[in-house]
Image (spheres, grey):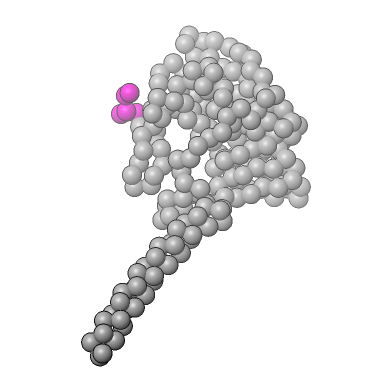
Amino acid sequence: MLKEAGNMWKDNMKWSGIGVVLLALGLSASSGAQTAQDGWVPPVHPIPTGKAPGMKVQLLSTIGQQKTYAVIFYRGDEAFSGLTDFALKYHVTSAHFTAIGALHGAELAWFDPARKMYKKIPIEGQVEVISMIGDIALYKGKPSVHTHMVVGLPDGSTRGGHVLEAHVSPTLEVYVTVDPTDMHKRLDPETDLTLIDPAVHE
């Protein structure tokens, strides 16, 4: 009888231990999902396209093999998506750009090297685009847009960061210089960022 009771106690402890492990795994997974929902995003993430239906493009100049375009966005366009669409349509393999305009809402971000994640910085309401600079390079054979932005709030204060989304209102004027020499990015394992590397040739 004592032996049977001892075996039952051991079985209960075994299942209890498994339950604790499963609970811990569940909490860990839940914590990871919550982290993503709580305003963190990994450096490499899908970029939605087709969110700038009003975008218009005009070729401004051609000097040798270098071209300059005006890429103009209008109310309701999401500019980061639109710049990605522009780069895909015009087969951009290397470019740099600047922009001015205004937005109604944006999502900027700050990179935390320790977490290898971007912390989202939500921007609400109407703001002026004080400065927007960026580049386009190839990553895994496709154009990858990278841009930073500073916006002006109604009281004249500013906020800035890495651009995740930029919702145009009433317009955003982007001047893109496309260069003839391909520029490539590589994945940096120390940061999980895709960094421009002149040594990379695909």
In which quadrant of the rendered image does the N terminus lie?
bottom left
What percent of the width, then of the height, locates residue 151? 66, 42
| Above or below for 141 versus 149 | above
Q: Which residue is at a point 64% across and 49% down the rendered structure image?
A: 122
Q: Residue furthest bottom?
A: 2
Residue toward you, 89 or 5: 5
Residue toward you, 157 or 38: 38
Residue toward you, 108 or 158: 108
Query: What residue range appears in magenta?
Result: 198-202
Q: Which residue is at a point 46% across and 50% down the rendered structure image?
A: 117
Report the predominant secondary structure element of the magenta stretch: loop
Magenta-colored stretch includes residue 201: yes
- Does residue 4 appear left or right of residue 166 in this picture? left
| Above or below for 84 versus 57 | below
Q: Which residue is at a point 64% across and 30% down the rendered structure image?
A: 51
Q: Residue furthest front?
A: 1
Question: Residue 50's quadrant in the figure?
Answer: top right
| Above or below for 82 versus 3 | above
Q: Which residue is at a point 31% across and 83% down the rendered structure image?
A: 9
Question: Residue 80's quadrant in the figure?
Answer: top right
What percent of the width, then of the height, locates residue 55? 66, 23
What percent of the width, then of the height, locates residue 154? 76, 47
Asked if residue 30 can be seen in this view, the reply is yes
Residue toward you, 166 or 3: 3
In which quadrant of the rendered image does the C terminus lie?
top left
What percent of the width, then of the height, locates residue 132? 60, 35
Asked if residue 176 can be seen in this view, the reply is no
